[in-house]
Amino acid sequence: MDRIPVQSSNVASVGYDEDSATLEVGFNDGSVYQYFGVSLQVYEGLMNASSKGSYLNQHIKRGGYGYSKVG
């Protein structure tokens, strides 16, 4: 999945596949996680958030989405 670089102290890049509703997040430490069942609205919220890390933590990590470490 292609990821877009973002400005964040914790998140390096973000990708999204609308067909599978999969969000892929690359972190500054080099790890990559995929989150499943993420709506386009939540992805857009992340991309428009002033703090990507805070949005990710509040709406995605605590949102109950299934996830997998892929890198």
Image (cartoon, grey):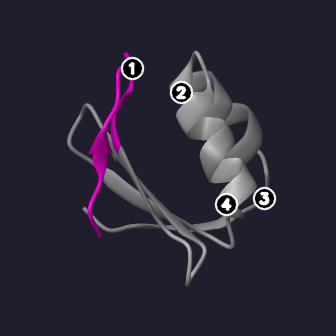
Instruction: Assign a secondary structure to mark 4.
Output: helix
Which tag, 1 or 3, sits closer to the chain's start? 1
Mark closer to the chain start, 4 or 1: 1
For residue 48, the mark is none
4 or 1: mark nearer the eye: 4
Please, which residue is most extreme toward the right here?
63
| Labelled disc at residue 52 | 2
The amino acid at mark 3 is Gly
Q: Tell me the residue that label 1 is attached to.
A: 8
Q: Magenta region, mostly helix, strand or loop? A: loop
**Residue occupying the far left of the picture:** 30
Q: Position of residue 64 (x, y in %)?
A: 78, 59
Q: Residue at x 63, y 23 (%)?
A: 54
Q: Nearer the viewer, mark 4 or mark 3?
A: 4
Is 60 positioned to the left or the right of 69 in the image?
A: right
The number of numbered badges drawn on the structure is: 4
